[in-house]
Amino acid sequence: ASAELVEIAPDLYFANSEYTKNDFIKYFGINSKDSFLNLKNLMNGKIIDVDVIKIGDHYSLNLTNIGLDAMIAKNVSKFKRIPFIKGKTAYKLSIAYSFFTSTKHYMDIIIDGNKEKENCYTIAVFANSKYYGGSYYASPLSDIQDGLMDIVLLPKLSRLGILKILPVYEKGKHLEEKYKNIVHYKQAKKAELKTKEPITLCLDGELITLKD
């Protein structure tokens, strides 16, 4: 399967404070939810153009993630089918299940025409904005008006390696120099993904599967 993240396009307007569980509006401040829920603020607010990532026929305003985190979101449904398993319990069971089944994802990634040397990743993020998953500060350098997507790649990690990097990743400190051998960061106009097997992408919380 292949997916192409094409050049970021302008002219998308935003005014929905409930978008993707408020992850996008955290770009404007970690506590900006109240401002977006204030009708007077919205009526008097300024409309701005922001970037959006186009993936095939789909669009991502916040970010698109692939790998362990996307599979956690996908596998929640497995546990919600079990009687009396709901909400946070299903999510916690999905984390445990995915941790032992979904840490390696094989794909080729071509960024602005240059193929990455790795072909196995634990997490890959293609970001327009900064936060996802409620609290994960995945792309701290993102600018929603710079015409570039920020690409954060975590090539294949051991389970111990995942446990070590996740707290750092959540706080947005993973782009520090000392983690450069674990986390790869790039900015680009365009990226392409190629896999031999169907692959699950999470676009602003919406799950899609790409296949040949």
Image: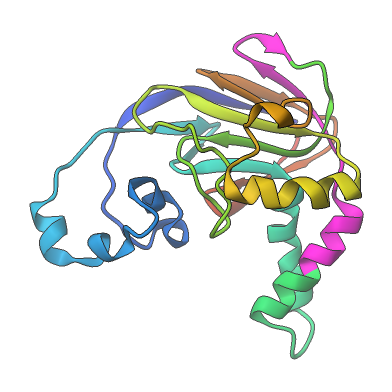
> Could you tell me residue 24's position as x and y percent?
42, 50
Q: How is the image coloured?
A: rainbow
Asked whether 123 or 112 is in front, the reply is 123
Q: In the shown orientation, is residue 200 left or right of residue 136?
A: right
Boundaries of the magenta span: 94-115
Asked whether 198 or 153 is in front, the reply is 153
Q: Quadrant of the N terminus?
A: top right
Q: Residue at x 56, y 54 (%)?
A: 205
Is any atom of residue 143 visible in this view?
yes
User: Would you say residue 82 sits in the magenta stretch?
Assistant: no
Q: In the shown orientation, is residue 104 left or right of residue 91?
A: right
Q: Residue at x 62, y 32 (%)?
A: 175
> Could you tell me residue 29's position as x and y percent?
35, 51
Q: Residue at x 51, y 38 (%)?
A: 140
> Could you tell me residue 195's position as x and y percent?
80, 29
Q: Residue furthest bottom?
A: 84
| Vertical position of residue 169 compared to residue 108: above or below | below
| Vertical position of residue 199 compared to residue 109: above or below | below
Is any atom of residue 212 visible in this view?
no
> Could you tell me residue 138's position as x and y percent?
58, 43
User: Would you say residue 99 sits in the magenta stretch?
Assistant: yes
Q: In the shown orientation, is residue 62 left or right of residue 39?
A: right
Q: Quadrant of residue 89?
A: bottom right
